[in-house]
Image: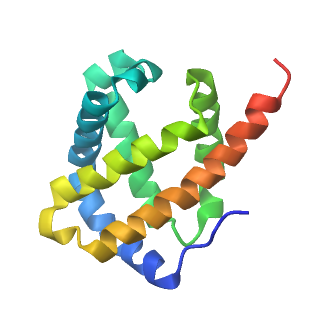
């Protein structure tokens, strides 16, 4: 069962949407930079042409913004979550990869937003990340279990 976000976390996540609209691409670029340096073993899970063209960081930035804007109405994200889970299964994403992304995403938010990334904001984003991760992991588990 997915843990619900606190009302305070929802308010903080929604309040970060304008910053994500402005700095989301810088955040995702920084996240991938940090993650690939610290965990080169996950690099092959990503389409390197999409990385080099900048398309993957743009897609992730748009997804994070959509998540922030819909954090109080996650039912709006059913289709995108299903597509993301399918892509994760195609590339071999497993539950043990989620902490790697979490650490690097939160660090990238802190790096890019600086003082605006308060402890409360980072905590809210950590909670929000893990709510979405649980949804994705559950969906991916079902997809992995389907006959090939």
**Residue drawn at (63%, 68%) of the image:** 3
The vertical placement of 64 against 10, above or below, is above
Q: Is residue 31 left or right of residue 9?
A: left
**Colour pattern:** rainbow
> What residue is rendered at 41% in x and 49% in y?
102
Q: Residue furthest right?
A: 147
Q: Quadrant of residue 88?
A: top right
In the image, 34: left or right of 147? left
Q: Residue 62's x, y, as percent?
A: 39, 47
Q: Which quadrant: the N terminus?
A: bottom right
Q: Nearer the viewer, residue 99 or 148?
A: 99
Say left or right for 111 vs 83. Answer: left
Instruction: Measuring from the top left, give residue 66's x and y in whole percent.
Output: 45, 56
Q: Residue furthest bottom?
A: 8
Give the percent coordinates (x, y) of residue 52: 26, 20
Q: Residue at image x 40%, y 22%?
A: 41
Q: Quadrant of residue 125?
A: bottom left
Quadrant where the C terminus lies? top right
Q: Position of residue 47 (x, y in %)?
A: 41, 19
Q: Residue 18, located in which quarter of the rendered image? A: bottom left
């Amino acid at each position: 069962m997915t843990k619900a976000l606190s009302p305070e976390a929802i308010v903080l996540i929604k309040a970060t949407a304008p910053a994500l609209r402005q700095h989301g691409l810088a955040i995702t670029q920084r996240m991938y930079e940090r993650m690939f340096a610290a965990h080169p073993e996950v690099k092959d899970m990503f389409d390197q042409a999409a990385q080099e063209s900048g398309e993957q960081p743009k897609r992730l930035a748009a997804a994070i913004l959509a998540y922030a804007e819909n954090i109080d109405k996650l039912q709006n994200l059913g289709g995108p979550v299903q597509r993301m889970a399918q892509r994760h299964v195609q590339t071999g994403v497993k539950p043990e990869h989620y902490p790697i992304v979490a650490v690097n995403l939160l660090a990238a938010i802190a790096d890019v937003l600086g003082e605006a990334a308060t402890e409360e904001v980072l905590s809210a984003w950590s909670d929000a990340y893990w709510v979405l991760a649980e949804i994705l992991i559950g969906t991916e588990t079902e997809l992995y279990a389907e006959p090939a």
